[in-house]
């Protein structure tokens, strides 16, 4: 993984999470803006997936378990899809809150992914 | 914004008849994320190093299964049967996190390996400890239609 790109993703995921959480708690139903912010995180995650395929052969191999890493990455890729589908099916403000929870969960998963790639405690 | 609000939760009687209401939806997404995380983690543990701690990793898989069942049961909790399933799953989960949490401190050799429930869910910022309490509260306050008031 590339540290600065991870940081960008975490910042965007937290921003999207906070944004949707605030909008949701303020009573807004999912909008292009709130759904779009989560779609943006998904787009960055897709770039991350490409990076994760190329990095090991380009001299940036993971120090941790690549299988564990991909389990996280695939999970992270699925979460926004689930959140956006939810927002499309259930047009209430709680769907916006759900998008916010998805955003923060993604931030945590990205952090874990960076840890798996670079830092080995065990 | 006032308009948006009046459209969202102004009709509780309709919501009650359809599916989950209000904050219960947030509960479901947190459960879904926990189910995803626990399933992924136990999958890796069992594939990579099951022989290191078969007991702890079996528990990890059990926890993952319970989270999946709890997530589904909460979504369908408006039906009588699933409501009971939700109770069983969440009580099991609360028992699990307390028992395994205690054992991981008392017998670290057996339970010290990370699973969702070891050290009372510390690796998951104690969400596993808080979540079932919140879940039971939600079930208590939202019995299915036709059951006790």
Image (spheres, rainbow, N blue to C red):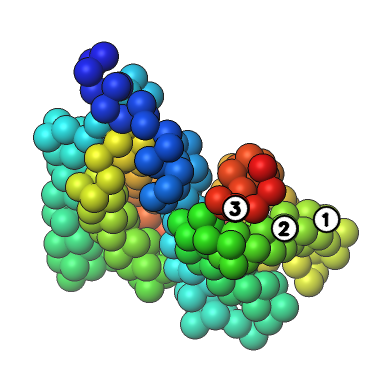
Above or below, B112 relative to B131: below
Q: Residue at x 53, y 57 (%)?
A: B77
- Outermost residue toward the front in this view: B146
Q: Which mark is residue B102?
A: 1
The chain under label 1 reads B
On the picture, is B100 further left or further right than B123?
A: right
Q: In the image, is B38 to the left or to the right of A65?
A: right
10 Å crowding of disc 1: few (<14), some (14-19), many (20+): some
**Mark earlier in primary sequence (3, 2):** 2
Could you say which disc has been placed on residue B91 in the image? 2
Q: Residue at x 29, y 22 (%)?
A: B6
Front disc: 3 or 2: 3
The disc numbered 2 marks a residue on which chain? B
- Considering every residue shown, the one lying at the far right of the view is B106
Quick one: B24 or A46, which is closer to the camera?
A: B24
Mark 2 or mark 1: which comes first in sequence? 2
Residue A2 visible in the snapshot: no
Proximity of marks 3 and 2: CB atoms separated by less than 8 Å = no
Q: Earlier in the sequence, mark 1 or mark 3?
A: 1
Q: Quadrant of the C terminus of chain A?
A: bottom right
Is disc 2 on the same chain as disc 3? Answer: yes
Q: Which residue is mark 3?
A: B146
Q: CA distance from mark 3 to mark 2?
A: 23 Å
- A1 or B8: which is nearer to us? B8
Q: Can you give x and y, in whole percent of width and height, for residue A43 in the image?
A: 14, 49
Q: Are marks 1 and 3 on the same chain?
A: yes
Number of numbered discs on residues: 3
């Amino acid at each position: 993984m590339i540290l600065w790109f991870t940081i960008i993703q975490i910042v965007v995921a937290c921003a999207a999470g906070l944004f949707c959480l605030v909008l949701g708690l303020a009573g807004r139903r999912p909008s292009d803006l709130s759904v779009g912010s989560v779609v943006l995180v998904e787009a960055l995650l897709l770039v991350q997936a490409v990076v994760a395929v190329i990095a090991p052969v380009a001299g940036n191999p993971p120090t941790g378990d690549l299988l564990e890493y991909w389990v996280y990455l695939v999970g992270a890729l699925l979460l926004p899809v689930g959140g956006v589908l939810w927002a499309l099916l259930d047009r209430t403000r709680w769907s916006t809150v759900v998008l916010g929870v998805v955003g923060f969960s993604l931030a945590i998963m990205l952090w874990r992914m960076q840890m798996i790639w670079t830092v080995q405690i065990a | 914004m006032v308009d948006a609000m009046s459209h969202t939760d102004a009709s509780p009687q309709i919501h009650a008849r359809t599916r989950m209401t209000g904050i219960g939806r947030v509960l479901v997404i947190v459960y879904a994320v926990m189910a995803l995380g626990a399933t992924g983690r136990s999958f890796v543990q069992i594939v990579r190093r099951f022989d290191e701690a078969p007991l702890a990793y079996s528990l990890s898989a059990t926890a993952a299964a319970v989270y999946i069942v709890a997530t589904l049961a909460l979504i369908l909790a408006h039906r009588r049967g699933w409501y009971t399933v939700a109770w069983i799953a969440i009580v099991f989960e609360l028992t699990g996190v307390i028992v395994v949490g205690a054992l991981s401190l008392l017998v670290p050799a057996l339970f010290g390996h990370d699973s969702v429930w070891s050290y009372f869910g510390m690796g998951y910022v104690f969400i596993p400890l808080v979540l079932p309490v919140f879940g039971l509260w939600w079930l208590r306050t939202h019995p299915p239609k036709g059951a006790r008031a």
